Amino acid sequence: MNWTPYLFLSIISLVTYNLLQKISASKIGTLSAIPFLAIGIIIVTVASYTTQRFLPREELFTYNGALLAVGVGLFWGIAQIFVYLMYKNNAPLSIGFPLLLGG
């Protein structure tokens, strides 16, 4: 399977995410934003499970995998707080996007 469509879709998603987070940082408090981020996550989760229900593949689920996923979620949540604080303190958008891409 070709991975390049996923690359472009992830870039578009991350750019949109970064832009919306930059805009919202001046319009909502950091801690107030967390429940709304969770609503977005729930929407994506329900959409994923609904879509996967109709796909002919088996999902792998292990205890260690679940623990690692919880760890990823915890650190993602902590990172969100810091990104909001970064933008609240007027960090330029050009700094935030490369940070999110890991470099």
Image (cartoon, rainbow, N blue to C red):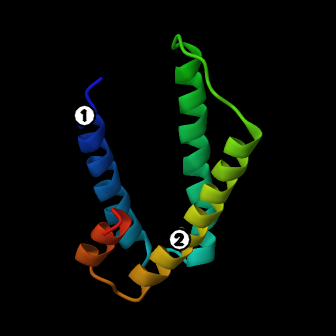
Residue 13, image x, y percentages: 33, 49
Residue 16, image x, y percentages: 31, 55
Circle 1: residue type? Pro
Q: Is residue 66 left or right of residue 77?
A: right
The residue furthest bottom is 89
**Which element is circle 2 on?**
helix
Residue drawn 61% across and 24% down? Answer: 59
Ranked by sequence position, the earlier of labels 1 and 2 is 1
Residue drawn 29% across and 57% down? Answer: 15
Residue 99, image x, y percentages: 34, 71
Q: Is residue 2 left or right of residue 49?
A: left
Q: Quadrant of the N terminus?
A: top left
| Front in this rendered view, residue 8 or 31 | 8
Q: Distance from label 1 to label 2 (Cα)? A: 26 Å
Circle 2: residue type? Ala
What residue would you read off at disc 1?
A: 5
**Residue 26 lies in what quarter of the image?**
bottom left
Residue 79 circle label: 2
| Front in this rendered view, residue 97 or 37 | 97
The residue furthest right is 63
Residue drawn 28% across and 69% down? Answer: 98
| Count of numbered circles on the image | 2
What crowding class fits label 2: few (fewer than 14 Cα within 10 Å), some (14-19), or many (20 or more)?
A: few
